Every structure is written in C-alpha cells, then in structure tokens.
Amino acid sequence: MNRTPLEQNEQCDCRCIHQERVQAAKEQALTAKDNELLAALFKAMGDPNRLQILWALDQEEMCVCDLALFIGVSESAVSHQLRQLRQLQLVSNRRQGPILYYRLTDNHVSSLIHLALEHLQEEI
Amino acid sequence: MNRTPLEQNEQCDCRCIHQERVQAAKEQALTAKDNELLAALFKAMGDPNRLQILWALDQEEMCVCDLALFIGVSESAVSHQLRQLRQLQLVSNRRQGPILYYRLTDNHVSSLIHLALEHLQEEI
DNA sequence: TTAATATATGATCATTTGTTCATATATGTA
DNA sequence: TACATATATGAACAAATGATCATATATTAA
C-alpha cells in the first residue's frame, strides 16, 4: 500500500472512506487532552501488579511493605508503581511515623474495577 | 536495602509488615487469571489510539479506512490495533463485500469509558 | 549524634509495545 | 482470467515500560 499517514483534515477520494462517518466521529470526538487523560487512567490500571495494588487498597489501607509482600515483588518496585498511581491521583497516603499508609484517593477506581469485573464475568 | 523479592507465603518479621492486612488482602484477592484478564482489558483501553477507536465505534460502526483517517495513522496501524481489540473481544466486525465494518462487541466498554470520563470531570 | 527503619529515587537493562514497511489474503469487477 | 481494492500479517526497529540494584531521604530511637 505504501502510503503516508493521512493528515487530520485530509480527504482521500480513492479509498473506501465514509466521509460523513469520519466527520461525525471528529465532531463527537473527545478532546485530545481528555483522550490522553483517559488513556493514562486506563493504562495505569492496565498492569497486573498495579491492579493488584489498587484492588488491595480498595479493601484497606496498606503500607509499602505490606503491598510488596502481598504482590510478591520488591518494595522498590512497589514504590515506583505507587508513584505512578500517585501522580495520576489514583492513590493517596498518610504518614504515621516512618510508615506511609496508602489508600485509594476516591471510589472511582473501585467502581471501574468492579464494572470491568462484571464485564469479564458476563463474557464467560 | 538489597533484599530478594519476598515469596508469596514468606513472612518477614524484621519489617513493618501488618501480617493480618496482608493475609486479608490475599484472601480477598482476585484470582491470578481474573487479575490478568482485567489488567489486559484496561491495558487495551489504555492506549490513546485504541481509545479513540473505541470511542468512535461507540457512536457508529466504521471501516478500517474510516478509522485510519479519523485518528490520523496508517490503515496498517489501525488494523494491528483492531486485531488486539478483537482478540480481547472488545470489537467485532461484519463483512460487506470487501469492507469490514467494525463495532463494539457489547456496551461494557462504552460504560467503562463513560464512567472513567465522569471521574476525570469530577477531578478537575 | 549515630544507627536503624521505611520509603523514594536514579541508573540500568531486558522486555514489551506500537508503528512502518513489505507482502499476503480476500473480495469484487472487467 | 487479471486487476484493483480492502484488510491482515510478519519482520524490523525505535520508544516506552517495569523490574532490580544502589543510593538517598525521612523519621524515630538510642
């Protein structure tokens, strides 16, 4: 085929384009920023270890050591993952002496996981 | 620190472990399989281009050419992404002559996206 | 202050990912 | 049949990812 990628507004009258559908899709599309943010959110939840962390924190707050033991990786690895989750504001922590207790920032993540879980269970 | 990762059932009495929390987390944990499947689902939704595809298909079925034009990448790239989404059964297609029209397999994906979007909007 | 604990962070590296390019397959038409 | 169109697929490669290791920081206790 060997074609260069099409520009956003370029039309191509030599292909099976449904121009009106593309146009409608563009009009109803998420903003670039929203799309990026949404994708980042799903991506953060899309790693097995991070998902285990989120699932565990949905039940009870835990410290880094607990989480490391729970999911079976080093504390450093957990800490790196928690940083990502913190940056996306999916988790928060409170300090009690030297220990940081992590928890879910709000219940949105929990809702998403449970909704997705329903999807899985209907699937099979 | 320089420690080897802890095994699933290994205890460590020299750290800040809350043994009962770890135990509870293990008891309530998702099965390994469910965790993997869930993560795979979120991961699939966690790429900007795939998310745009899913969002567009939530409105109307579209062919590969349409999608390529819509998100501004090559048809080959779209086809590769659609394969992933197909393998996870997030999208399905119907053939009409030489053209494959893609659509969302069910409305779960749509629900997930909209729920996540609410999360974003409350966030800001 | 010194030492120990709990966590964070930077560098490194192997693996994974997403795109492109080239090619293959499938359908329709002349 | 031959040819064009629509899509799929495999190889290759750059970029992103996630873990580990070594080290740094923060808190507490001696």
Image (cartoon, coloured by chain):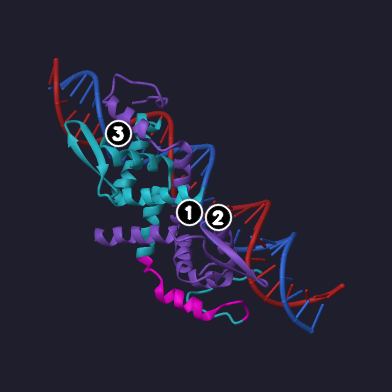
Chain colours: A cyan, B purple, C blue, D red
| A29 falls in the magenta region | yes
Q: Amino acid at mark 1?
A: Ala
Q: Are marks 1 and 2 on the same chain?
A: yes
Is A28 included in the stretch rendered in magenta? Answer: yes
The residue stretch that appears in magenta? A14-33
**Callout 3 crowding tier (Cα within 10 Å): few <14, some 14–19, many ≥20:** many
Instruction: Chain letter for mark 3, please.
Output: A
Report the front residue among B119 and B109. B109
* Image x and y of residue B110, in percent: 42, 62
Measuring from the top left, give residue B93's x and y in whole percent. 58, 64
**Which element is circle 2 on?**
helix
Q: For this rendering, which residue is in front, A16 or B76? A: A16
Residue receiving disc 1 = B44
Q: Quadrant of the C terminus of chain B?
A: bottom left
Q: Main secondary structure of the magenta part?
A: helix
Amino acid tagged 2:
Gln
* Residue drawn at x 35%, y 65% as measured from the top left: A33
Q: Are marks 1 and 2 in contact (CB under 8 Å)?
A: yes
Do the residues indicated by labels 3 and 2 lie within the same chain of the protein?
no
Q: Nearer the viewer, mark 3 or mark 2?
A: 2
The residue wearing badge 3 is: A64
Give the vertical position of B37 relative to A26 (above or below): above
Label 2 sits on residue: B84
| Chain for numbered disc 2 | B
Asked if disc 3 and disc 1 are in contact, CB closer than 8 Å, the reply is no
Figure quadrant of residue A98 = top left
How many numbered marks appear? 3
Left/right placement of residue A93 relative to residue B64 reads: left
| Rendered position, A6 above or below B34 | below
